[in-house]
Image (cartoon, rainbow, N blue to C red):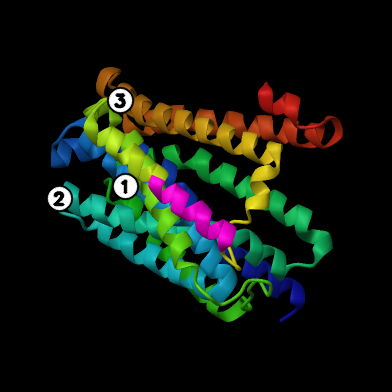
Amino acid sequence: MGIGMRRALSFTAIVLGFFMALLDTTIINIALPEMTRQFGGSVSQVSWVMNGYNLAFAVFILTASRLADQFGRKKVFLIGVGLFTLSSLLAGLSTSLGMLILFRVIQGLAGAVIVPVTIPLSTTTFPKEMHGLIIGIWGAVSGVAAASGPALGGILTQKLSWEWIFFVNVPLGLLSIGLTVIFIQESRDDSAGRSIDYGGILGITGGMFCITYALIKVQDYGWSSRPFLGLTAADLLFLVVFFLTQYKGKEPMLPLSLLKIRAFNSTSVSMIVLGAALMNISLLTSFYLTRVMGVSELKAGLVLSTMALGSIASSAVSGPLSAKYGSSLFAAA
């Protein structure tokens, strides 16, 4: 088999895993009203099917990235895809809302393992002159995953049942695992040591959990309530631990020099605001379309997909122009 074919099959394995993890951030929204009908509970309770995934993803993503650099990206990617595939199967077989939320949390942990290693796996598979093309394809796949999620979720929920939004991951995951084992070579960051930064892991995991959970539950607790203020205080404490370990550690998870880059900080804040807005729009609109307007899951999914399609179109225009004129004006617009 030629080098080109091996690279194509390697990239296919990476894209399948990446596609699954991103697809499950949008495919679930359209099925939430149907899950509410089956399991009961309030919108706030069933929203944990989405929140559980996002919470686990946010908590573990930096740790997963670091461990992949240290101990092998192929190995970590296989663990992530295998866990994601198994948890997808078990989520589809869930018989209660609590059981479903549990497996969604496991899915989120697996997604946090998969997504950050896909770019370094891709760039080590292809020569340097092809990196721009590969990252462009990577971005296009993320757009397709976001755009197709609501529509695919609507089709599967309406024509089959909501369980199939999880079952569809099983063949994709198995194919990704098979191709990864055969065609992808192991890679790691040679500059990363082998010692595990336990203090850094504790600090960032605890901090991300406390602040994310606090923001999810603030509508129940209230902004001035003891639980919210306690979670905020715990978050600050964990972050102090994290930054102290990163400042004093010989092999930090996060080089603090990054935080001296103003563009990095402002972009990160912008992405937090954008992500929060998009997730809330998707959740509330899915209930509004199906419960208030009475449209089918398929039609609701198609409506939600237009948001991602608009994002793809604007990216296609702003990407090349940003390279020529700078990105600040386009990001602000």
The mark lying in front, picked from 1 and 2, is 1
Q: Which residue is depicted at the point 84% across and 30% down?
A: 325
- Foreground residue among 303 and 127: 127
* Mark 1 to mark 2 CA distance (whole Å): 15 Å
Circle nearer the N terminus (1, 3) = 1
* Mark 2 to mark 3 CA distance (whole Å): 31 Å
Q: Which residues are magenta?
A: 237-248
When asked about the image quadrant of residue 324, the answer is: top right
Circle nearer the N terminus (2, 3) = 2
Q: What predominant SS class does the magenta segment belong to?
A: helix
Query: In which quadrant of the rendered image does the N terminus lie?
Result: bottom right
Q: Amino acid at mark 3?
A: Trp
Is residue 246 covered in magenta? yes
Query: In which quadrant of the rendered image does the C terminus lie?
Result: top right
Q: Which residue is mark 1?
A: 52
When asked about the image quadrant of residue 31, the answer is: top left
Q: Is 113 placed left or right of 298 in the picture?
A: right
Q: Amino acid at mark 2?
A: Ser
- Tell me the tag on residue 106: none
Q: Secondary structure at mark 1?
A: helix
The mark lying in front, picked from 1 and 3, is 3
- Tell me the tag on residue 96: 2
Q: Which residue is depicted at the point 33% across and 23% down?
A: 289
Circle nearer the N terminus (1, 2) = 1
Dot 2 surroundings within 10 Å: few (below 14), some, or many (20 or more)?
few
Q: Which residue is mark 3?
A: 223
Q: Secondary structure at mark 3?
A: loop
